[in-house]
Image (tube, grey):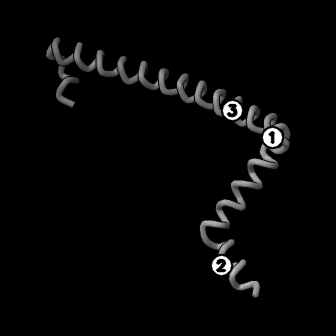
């Protein structure tokens, strides 16, 4: 008797049931999760800003090394063979 119901829930009907629950409960759940989602987005933005700043600093340091090596190479200094 319940086997048919359980089979239906496990198949496409299960997805339809879940979609129905989301549609019905969605607005109430969304209102409660909004502050959580906003906090996660703020954290992501702060993290990406830190990563961007760190990578720009590393890039500048690497560019300084490249420019120094090019300058020494052009001048034919003994350090250019290293």
Q: Is 80 in front, or is 43? A: 43
Residues at circles 3 and 1 in contact by the CB criterion of under 8 Å: no
Q: CA distance from mark 3 to mark 2?
A: 39 Å
Q: Is 20 in front, or is 31? A: 20
Query: Where, quadrant-wise, is the N terminus in this rendering?
Result: bottom right
Q: Which x, y percent locates residue 38?
A: 75, 32
Q: CA distance from mark 3 to mark 1?
A: 20 Å
Q: Which x, y percent locates residue 69?
A: 26, 20
| Image height of 23 relative to 45, above or below | below
How many numbered discs?
3
Which label's residue is closer to the chain start, 2 or 1?
2
Helix, strand or loop at mark 2: helix
Disc number for residue 73: none
Helix, strand or loop at mark 1: helix
The residue depicted at 77 percent of the width and 55 percent of the height is: 21
The residue depicted at 74 percent of the width and 51 percent of the height is: 22
The residue that mark 3 highlights is: 41
The residue that mark 2 highlights is: 7
Residues at circles 2 and 1 in contact by the CB criterion of under 8 Å: no
**Comparing marks 2 and 1, which lies closer to the viewer?**
2
């Amino acid at each position: 008797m319940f086997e048919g119901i359980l089979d239906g829930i496990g198949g496409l009907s299960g997805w339809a049931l879940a979609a129905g629950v989301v549609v019905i409960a969605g607005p109430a759940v969304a209102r409660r999760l909004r502050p959580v989602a906003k906090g996660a987005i703020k954290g992501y933005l702060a993290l990406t800003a830190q990563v961007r700043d760190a990578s720009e600093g590393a890039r500048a340091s690497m560019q300084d090394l490249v420019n120094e090596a090019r300058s020494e190479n052009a001048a034919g200094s003994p350090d250019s063979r290293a």
